[in-house]
Image: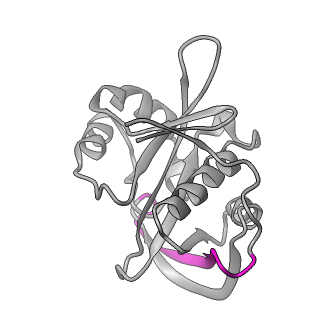
Amino acid sequence: MFVRTERLLLRPGWVEDAPALARAIGEEAIVRNLATAPWPYDVAKARAFLSQERDARLPSFLIFARTHGAPRLVGGCGLGHTPDGKAVELGYWIGRPHWGLGYATEAGRALVELAHALGIRTLTAGHFVDNPASGRVLRKLGFRPTGRVVPRGSEGRGEEAPCALYVRDAEDGSMPCPTPPVPLAA
């Protein structure tokens, strides 16, 4: 499955993407804000990640900026199960050179719409409390804080860190995603 937005192409990652993925995510400032990415992150870890089997009902994408030339890898996003397996959560990361350009919000909006199309009515998300920019993105996407902060493991940090939890229900009047993505054929 592929998703196209105004500026982005979201597509599954392939093993051939490993060098570009390692370059894009391979900064401690990025990895420390993720729960499951290890640090240091190198091409071998990127290959292993891209080789993992995925639940087809919960897509995972690399985010590419659509340019006049070849698309440029700027981040990653996807849907996955929460650590307890009871809910579906949205996750994303953006490479440092692309911070502040709205790519996380644009890709997140596409994922929210895709989740809705897949019949997922409730999404959760979280961010480490020392990463407030991620909380701002989640609020733009219509997520609302639950008021809960829980310890969550971070492979990149090598320890648990406080994580603020958010939820977005399709029926709760959360902010709609005004620019739906255009799904492309698989």
Which is more toward the observer, 86 or 160? 86
Q: Position of residue 102 (x, y in %)?
A: 74, 44
Residue at 55% of width from left, 24% of height from top?
A: 72
Report if residue 23 lies within the magenta region.
no
Q: Position of residue 138 (x, y in %)?
A: 69, 64
Q: Which colour scheme is used?
A: one colour
Above or below for 174 versus 32: below
Report if residue 171 lies within the magenta region.
yes
Residue at 42% of width from left, 75% of height from top?
A: 82
Which is more toward the observer, 11 or 183? 183
Q: Quadrant of residue 121?
A: bottom right
Which is more toward the observer, 18 or 91? 91
Residue at 34% of width from left, 31% of height from top?
A: 18
Which is more toward the observer, 25 or 68? 68
- Image: magenta residue range: 156-173
In the picture, measured across the screen, residue 12 lies left or right of residue 117, that is: left
**Can you name the residue that lies furthest to the top here?**
69
**Can you name the residue that lies furthest to the bottom here?**
147
